[in-house]
Image (spheres, rainbow, N blue to C red):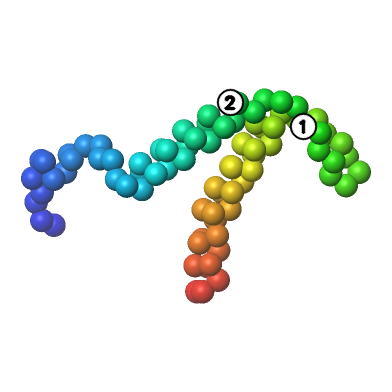
Amino acid sequence: MPLESVTERHKGFQWTPKLVIWTILLIAALIFLLQNFDDVRINLLFWDYTLPLALIVGICFVLGYVLGWIRPVFRAHRRS
């Protein structure tokens, strides 16, 4: 195992382009959620719900993130 210098091992925190984009998207999503607390009526089959729009959009954001994270796992499992 090659020896690394202290500066190579402890680079610290670095802002990568991907991290900057994710941070901007997260801030924009949080601002959007905080500005939309009006109640919305939802009809799903036989049920009627009244929920804050921020909750609905937040659930959609989380589900989209989880599905986007899980999809490559299933594709990799399917190939093997």
* Relative height, residue 52 to residue 17 (above, below): above
Secondary structure beneath dot 1 equals strand
Mark drawn on residue 60: none
Cα distance between the residues tagged 1 and 2: 15 Å
Q: Which residue lies furthest to the right in this view?
A: 46
Question: Residue 63, position in %: x, y?
Answer: 61, 46
Measuring 49% from the left and 35% from the top, which residue is drawn there? Answer: 28
Residue at 59 percent across and 42 percent down: it is 61
* Residue 58 shown left or right of residue 9 in the figure: right
First reached walking from the N terminus: tag 1 or tag 2: 2
Left or right relative to 28: residue 23: left
The secondary element bearing badge 2 is classed as helix
Expressed as whole percent of the image width and height from the top left, the position of residue 39 reads 75, 27
Residues marked 1 and 2 touching at CB (< 8 Å): no
Q: Which residue is more in the foreground, 77 or 21?
A: 21
The answer to which of 68 and 17 lies nearer the viewer is 17
Quadrant position of residue 8: top left
Could you tell me which quadrant the N terminus lies in? bottom left
Q: Position of residue 16 (x, y in %)?
A: 29, 45
Q: In the image, what residue occupies the spot 91% across and 43% down?
A: 46
- The residue indicated by pointer 1 is 40
Graded by Cα atoms within 10 Å as few (under 14), some (14 to 19) or many (20 or more), the crowding at tag 2 reads: few
Q: Nearer the viewer, residue 16 or 38?
A: 38
Q: Which amino acid does label 1 sit on?
A: Val
The residue identified by callout 2 is 34
Residue shown at 46% from the left, 40% from the top: 25
Label 1 CA crowd tier, 10 Å (few <14, some 14–19, many 20+): some
Q: Which amino acid does label 2 sit on?
A: Leu
How many marks are shown on the rendered structure?
A: 2
Residue 42 location in percent, x, y?
81, 38
